[in-house]
Amino acid sequence: MHALAGVVTLVMGALLAAAPAVAADRHDHRSAYAGEETRAIKALSPQDVDDLLNGRGWGFAKSAELNGMPGPAHLLEMADEIALSPEQRRKIEALFAEMQAEAKALGRTYVDLERRLDQAFADGAITPETLTEQVTAIAEMRGRLRLVHLRAHLKTPDLLTPHRMVLYNRLRVYGSPAGAHHHAH
Protein backbone atom coordinates (compact mmCIF):
# COMPACT_ATOMS: atom_id res chain seq x y z
CA MET A 1 0.00 0.00 0.00
CA HIS A 2 2.88 2.30 0.88
CA ALA A 3 4.43 1.66 -2.50
CA LEU A 4 1.19 2.58 -4.28
CA ALA A 5 0.83 5.76 -2.22
CA GLY A 6 4.41 6.63 -3.11
CA VAL A 7 3.73 6.15 -6.83
CA VAL A 8 0.55 8.26 -6.64
CA THR A 9 2.44 10.99 -4.80
CA LEU A 10 5.24 10.84 -7.37
CA VAL A 11 2.79 11.03 -10.31
CA MET A 12 0.82 13.85 -8.69
CA GLY A 13 4.03 15.75 -8.05
CA ALA A 14 5.12 15.33 -11.66
CA LEU A 15 1.73 16.51 -12.91
CA LEU A 16 1.77 19.57 -10.67
CA ALA A 17 5.30 20.40 -11.73
CA ALA A 18 4.31 20.13 -15.40
CA ALA A 19 1.12 22.22 -15.00
CA PRO A 20 2.74 25.62 -15.64
CA ALA A 21 4.38 24.31 -18.82
CA VAL A 22 1.09 22.81 -20.02
CA ALA A 23 -0.72 26.05 -19.23
CA ALA A 24 1.88 28.02 -21.19
CA ASP A 25 1.25 25.80 -24.23
CA ARG A 26 -2.49 26.47 -24.14
CA HIS A 27 -4.10 29.29 -26.06
CA ASP A 28 -4.40 32.70 -24.52
CA HIS A 29 -7.98 33.03 -23.31
CA ARG A 30 -8.10 36.81 -23.33
CA SER A 31 -10.99 37.95 -25.42
CA ALA A 32 -10.51 39.86 -28.65
CA TYR A 33 -13.18 42.12 -27.10
CA ALA A 34 -11.04 42.97 -24.05
CA GLY A 35 -11.31 46.70 -23.43
CA GLU A 36 -14.58 47.05 -25.33
CA GLU A 37 -16.58 46.50 -22.13
CA THR A 38 -15.99 50.18 -21.34
CA ARG A 39 -17.72 51.39 -24.51
CA ALA A 40 -20.92 53.39 -24.11
CA ILE A 41 -22.58 50.93 -26.52
CA LYS A 42 -20.71 47.65 -26.42
CA ALA A 43 -21.48 46.56 -30.00
CA LEU A 44 -20.38 49.88 -31.54
CA SER A 45 -17.02 51.61 -31.42
CA PRO A 46 -16.95 55.38 -31.00
CA GLN A 47 -16.00 55.57 -34.69
CA ASP A 48 -19.00 53.41 -35.62
CA VAL A 49 -21.31 55.74 -33.69
CA ASP A 50 -19.76 58.80 -35.33
CA ASP A 51 -20.09 57.26 -38.81
CA LEU A 52 -23.71 56.28 -38.23
CA LEU A 53 -24.73 59.64 -36.74
CA ASN A 54 -23.08 61.50 -39.62
CA GLY A 55 -24.57 59.43 -42.44
CA ARG A 56 -21.31 57.83 -43.57
CA GLY A 57 -21.43 54.64 -45.60
CA TRP A 58 -20.08 52.19 -42.99
CA GLY A 59 -19.28 49.80 -45.86
CA PHE A 60 -22.97 49.33 -46.68
CA ALA A 61 -22.53 49.92 -50.41
CA LYS A 62 -19.49 47.77 -51.19
CA SER A 63 -21.47 45.51 -53.49
CA ALA A 64 -22.30 48.52 -55.68
CA GLU A 65 -18.95 50.32 -55.33
CA LEU A 66 -16.85 47.28 -56.14
CA ASN A 67 -19.03 46.42 -59.12
CA GLY A 68 -18.50 49.75 -60.83
CA MET A 69 -21.31 51.87 -59.41
CA PRO A 70 -19.79 54.83 -57.58
CA GLY A 71 -21.40 56.58 -54.67
CA PRO A 72 -22.11 60.29 -54.62
CA ALA A 73 -19.65 61.06 -51.79
CA HIS A 74 -16.71 59.60 -53.69
CA LEU A 75 -17.79 61.24 -56.92
CA LEU A 76 -17.82 64.63 -55.22
CA GLU A 77 -14.40 63.97 -53.67
CA MET A 78 -13.08 63.22 -57.17
CA ALA A 79 -15.12 65.80 -59.10
CA ASP A 80 -12.07 67.57 -60.54
CA GLU A 81 -10.18 64.38 -61.42
CA ILE A 82 -13.10 62.97 -63.38
CA ALA A 83 -14.08 66.39 -64.76
CA LEU A 84 -17.68 66.49 -63.61
CA SER A 85 -19.67 69.15 -65.41
CA PRO A 86 -21.38 71.80 -63.25
CA GLU A 87 -24.74 70.12 -63.94
CA GLN A 88 -23.42 66.67 -63.00
CA ARG A 89 -21.91 68.09 -59.83
CA ARG A 90 -25.20 69.80 -58.91
CA LYS A 91 -27.20 66.59 -59.44
CA ILE A 92 -24.70 64.49 -57.50
CA GLU A 93 -24.64 67.04 -54.65
CA ALA A 94 -28.45 66.85 -54.49
CA LEU A 95 -28.33 63.04 -54.49
CA PHE A 96 -25.68 63.08 -51.75
CA ALA A 97 -27.65 65.53 -49.60
CA GLU A 98 -30.78 63.41 -49.89
CA MET A 99 -28.89 60.20 -49.10
CA GLN A 100 -27.02 61.72 -46.18
CA ALA A 101 -30.12 63.25 -44.60
CA GLU A 102 -31.92 59.92 -44.70
CA ALA A 103 -28.83 58.01 -43.53
CA LYS A 104 -28.34 60.37 -40.56
CA ALA A 105 -31.94 59.94 -39.43
CA LEU A 106 -31.77 56.16 -39.75
CA GLY A 107 -28.30 56.12 -38.17
CA ARG A 108 -29.61 57.91 -35.08
CA THR A 109 -32.35 55.30 -34.77
CA TYR A 110 -29.86 52.46 -35.30
CA VAL A 111 -27.54 53.80 -32.57
CA ASP A 112 -30.52 54.24 -30.23
CA LEU A 113 -31.68 50.66 -30.86
CA GLU A 114 -28.18 49.31 -30.13
CA ARG A 115 -28.05 51.45 -26.97
CA ARG A 116 -31.37 50.00 -25.79
CA LEU A 117 -30.22 46.43 -26.40
CA ASP A 118 -26.99 47.09 -24.55
CA GLN A 119 -28.89 48.64 -21.64
CA ALA A 120 -31.33 45.72 -21.48
CA PHE A 121 -28.40 43.33 -21.08
CA ALA A 122 -26.70 45.63 -18.54
CA ASP A 123 -29.92 45.86 -16.50
CA GLY A 124 -30.56 42.12 -16.69
CA ALA A 125 -33.92 42.98 -18.22
CA ILE A 126 -33.51 40.99 -21.43
CA THR A 127 -35.88 38.10 -22.10
CA PRO A 128 -36.08 35.79 -25.10
CA GLU A 129 -39.04 37.82 -26.34
CA THR A 130 -37.46 41.26 -25.92
CA LEU A 131 -34.22 39.94 -27.38
CA THR A 132 -36.04 38.80 -30.51
CA GLU A 133 -37.91 42.10 -30.81
CA GLN A 134 -34.82 44.24 -30.32
CA VAL A 135 -32.51 42.27 -32.60
CA THR A 136 -35.18 42.16 -35.31
CA ALA A 137 -35.61 45.96 -35.08
CA ILE A 138 -31.82 46.44 -35.27
CA ALA A 139 -31.55 44.14 -38.29
CA GLU A 140 -34.40 45.94 -40.04
CA MET A 141 -32.81 49.32 -39.38
CA ARG A 142 -29.44 48.09 -40.63
CA GLY A 143 -31.14 46.88 -43.81
CA ARG A 144 -32.85 50.24 -44.29
CA LEU A 145 -29.54 52.04 -43.84
CA ARG A 146 -27.85 49.80 -46.37
CA LEU A 147 -30.68 50.34 -48.82
CA VAL A 148 -30.29 54.13 -48.57
CA HIS A 149 -26.61 53.90 -49.48
CA LEU A 150 -27.07 51.30 -52.21
CA ARG A 151 -29.95 53.23 -53.74
CA ALA A 152 -27.71 56.30 -54.10
CA HIS A 153 -25.07 54.18 -55.86
CA LEU A 154 -27.74 52.81 -58.16
CA LYS A 155 -28.67 56.33 -59.26
CA THR A 156 -25.17 57.61 -60.05
CA PRO A 157 -24.51 55.82 -63.38
CA ASP A 158 -27.38 57.73 -64.98
CA LEU A 159 -25.60 60.97 -64.04
CA LEU A 160 -22.26 60.06 -65.61
CA THR A 161 -20.91 59.35 -69.06
CA PRO A 162 -19.39 55.92 -69.69
CA HIS A 163 -15.97 57.61 -69.91
CA ARG A 164 -16.36 59.15 -66.43
CA MET A 165 -17.48 55.82 -65.00
CA VAL A 166 -14.38 54.08 -66.35
CA LEU A 167 -12.14 56.94 -65.20
CA TYR A 168 -13.66 56.85 -61.72
CA ASN A 169 -13.08 53.11 -61.37
CA ARG A 170 -9.50 53.37 -62.64
CA LEU A 171 -8.73 56.18 -60.18
CA ARG A 172 -10.21 54.10 -57.37
CA VAL A 173 -7.89 51.30 -58.53
CA TYR A 174 -10.76 48.99 -59.34
CA GLY A 175 -9.73 48.53 -62.95
CA SER A 176 -12.64 48.37 -65.34
CA PRO A 177 -15.38 46.28 -63.73
CA ALA A 178 -17.36 44.40 -66.32
CA GLY A 179 -20.58 46.04 -65.24
CA ALA A 180 -19.32 49.61 -65.09
CA HIS A 181 -19.87 50.51 -68.72
CA HIS A 182 -23.17 48.67 -68.98
CA HIS A 183 -24.88 50.86 -66.40
CA ALA A 184 -24.09 54.31 -67.71
CA HIS A 185 -26.51 56.08 -70.02
Image (cartoon, rainbow, N blue to C red):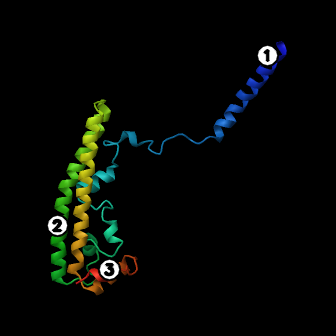
Q: Earlier in the sequence, mark 1 or mark 3?
A: 1
Q: Amino acid at mark 3?
A: Ala
Q: Amino acid at mark 2?
A: Ala
What residue sits 39% from the left and 39% below the top?
Answer: 37
Residue 81 visible in the displayed image: no
The residue labelled by disc 2 is 97
| Measured Cα–Cα span from mark 1 to mark 3 | 79 Å
Using a 10 Å C-alpha cutoff, classify the residue at mark 2 as few (fewer than 14 neighbours), some (14 to 19) or many (20 or more): some
Comparing 142 with 173, the one in front is: 142
Q: Which mark is residue 57?
A: none
Residue 137 visible in the displayed image: yes
Q: Earlier in the sequence, mark 2 or mark 3?
A: 2
| Measured Cα–Cα span from mark 2 to mark 3 | 24 Å
Query: Could you say where residue 124 lies in the image, as x and y percent from the top left?
Result: 31, 30
The residue labelled by disc 1 is 5
| Left-right relation of 119 to 178 | left
The residue labelled by disc 3 is 180
Q: Earlier in the sequence, mark 2 or mark 1?
A: 1
Query: Residues at badges 1 and 3 in contact (C-beta under 8 Å)?
Result: no
Using a 10 Å C-alpha cutoff, classify the residue at mark 3 as few (fewer than 14 neighbours), some (14 to 19) or many (20 or more): many
What residue sits 31% from the left and 41% below the top?
Answer: 40
The residue at the far right in this view is 3
Q: Amino acid at mark 1?
A: Ala
Q: Which of the two marks, 2 or 1, is nearer to us in this view?
A: 1
